[in-house]
Image: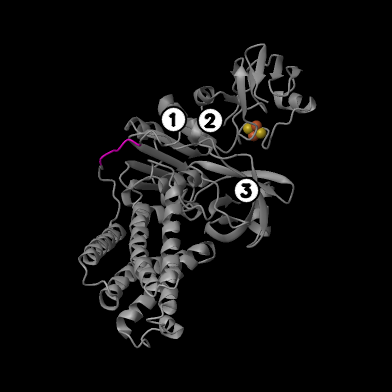
Amino acid sequence: MNDPHLWWYVTRASAVLAWVIMTAAVLWGIVLSTRVFRGADNPAWLQDLHRYLGGTALVLTLIHMVSLVLDPWLAMPIDQLLIPLIAEYRPLPVALGIVAFYVLAAVQVTSLVKNRLPRRLWKAVHYLSYVAVLAVAVHGAFAGTDAGAAWYQAVATVVVTATVLALIVRIIMARRRPTSAPVPAVAPTGTVPSLSEANPGDPLAVTRMRIVGKHPVADGIVRLRLARVDGRPIEPWYAGAHITLRLPVGIERQYSLCSDPADRGHIDIAVLRAEPTGLGSTYLHDVAGLGDELDVIGPRNHFPLEAAHEYLFIAGGIGITPIRAMIEALPPSRSWRLVYLGRTRSEMAFARELEQRYGDRVRVIAGDERAQRLDVAAEIGATDADVYACGSSGLLDDVVAATPVERCHVERFVAIDRAAGTERAPVTVITRRTGVRVDVPAEQSILTALQHAGVPVATSCGTGVCGTCETRVLAGTPQHLDSVMADADKDEIGVFYPCVSRATSPELVLDL
Ligand code: FES
């Protein structure tokens, strides 16, 4: 510490490192905004890396400033470090460094409270990062002591060139209007979640969340933004996921997530007011307000976006919610189309936004605009894309009827009655972990029998649509009577839903 050169070294090293890491953060921001890695990986780690790079650059900048004060040769007064243009030494270049510091700090602070800020404000502050990196370049060139050194000039050339290129890419991306012109279809790699990978973390863990945003997004539809009460990031989730809200009125309701899976600061749901019986939606529309806290189970995913060379999304009404998250998750180069149906345009959440952002990739068919009815069979028959659909039972029945099973992915809000006409036979259920053997009569559900026998099984809807009671089957043949996902998918990952499903074998061994 007594070496008079020590602080000089610290000053130089921290400055150059801060500059390089700040540039890396900007470049990583480009990777995020251009969705280069979307569909090829869980984007959450990219967000984390971006944040850590920005935070590290800010810490290094602070070290740089403190070392300027502590350096006995410079002993820079603190006010000259904090107030632009009053420095005795090269006031203008020093001022640019000070401005860059404030911008960097503003970017970090606004990112921490992003959920409470208008998105435009957060974005505007974020874009100032480019200005900060270039201001640092001028600051270093005219206020630094290494500007003439070859190594410094090499670093400066790389950093400035990278920043300018990043800025150009960002401007082009902002101006580019997506079209339905054919783009090279890139098959997503194997790291797109498989069915068994679509639920990282404990899907039944209960998290306390706070309502941090509430806005109407269409007639009768309100968007709620939820963030963890403890301020920690949301568990990683994939497009197509939903959460279960435990409402203070004593009921649980499932809602699809409609935000960007890469954004772990919050999750969004859109809630349709279901008159007159919708106790859950009435509560969320009329009673729940900003700052209210709710217990949230999940996210849980029974509708994951899987690898495909091309996608056809079909959404009916509020069924747009999981589809919107899927569109957010895909990289711009991926080939997809959306057909979005609704009774009236004013009741169609996100319709205008999706049209504006994605141009003629999006076809909105609103009943009040005298639009032609969708011929579902013809629409699907004209493509070999994988079909993802969510909406009314009638629409989904048409989609299922028209789509080859291996390309058909639907999510239902209302259970279909698959038990009608099927014979319900008694079955003996054995729970491997708890060692219970239960004889389930034909008129009783397996879930109820298990609960009576003291075997705890999580449950919510009780009608075979939410997926909460999902249980692994270790032996025996389940008879799937639920509406959660395709039977082949359930068999592939070895699960069934005991609230409605039964067995075709006399015994069923469960992982309970
Ligand atoms: S409780 Fe909802 S699917 Fe069984």
Q: Residue at x 43, y 47 (%)?
A: 43
Three-letter code for the amino acid on which mark 3 is drawn: Ala
Instruction: Check residue 485 in the rendering and tell me which mark sits there, or answer none.
Output: 2
Q: Which amino acid lies under the numbered mark 2 shown in the image of this protein?
A: Met
Circles 3 and 2 in contact, beta carbons < 8 Å: no
In three-dimensional space, the C-alpha distance between marks 1 and 3, rounded to whole angstroms, equals: 28 Å
Cα gap from disc 2 to disc 1, whole angstroms: 10 Å
Vertical comparison of 254 with 62: above or below: above
Provide residue 365's location: percent of width, then percent of height. Answer: 41, 46
Is 203 placed above or below 196 here?
Answer: below
Sort mark 1 into few (<14), some (14-19) or many (20+) by Cα contacts within 10 Å: some
Of marks 3 and 2, the one in the foreground: 2
Membership of 371 in magenta stretch: no
Viewer can see residue 276: no
Q: Is mark 1 within 8 Å of ligand 1?
A: no
Say which of 80 and 37 sits in front: 80
Residue 449 appears in which quarter of the rendering? Answer: top right
**Does dot 3 land on a helix, a strand or a loop?**
loop
Residues rendered magenta in the picture:
184-188
Q: Earlier in the sequence, mark 3 or mark 2?
A: 3
> Is 186 in the magenta?
yes
**Chosen colour scheme:** one colour
Q: Which residue is disc 3 drawn over? A: 274
- Residue 505: where, in percent of width, then height? 63, 12
Question: Is the C terminus in the top left, top right, bottom left or bottom right quadrant?
Answer: top right
Quadrant containing the N terminus is bottom left
Q: Which is more N-terminal, label 3 or label 1? A: 3
CB under 8 Å between discs 2 and 1:
no
Q: Is residue 423 among what the camera can see?
A: yes
Q: Which mark is residue 117?
A: none
Q: Position of residue 349 (x, y in %)?
A: 49, 53
Q: Secondary structure of the magenta portion, mostly?
A: loop
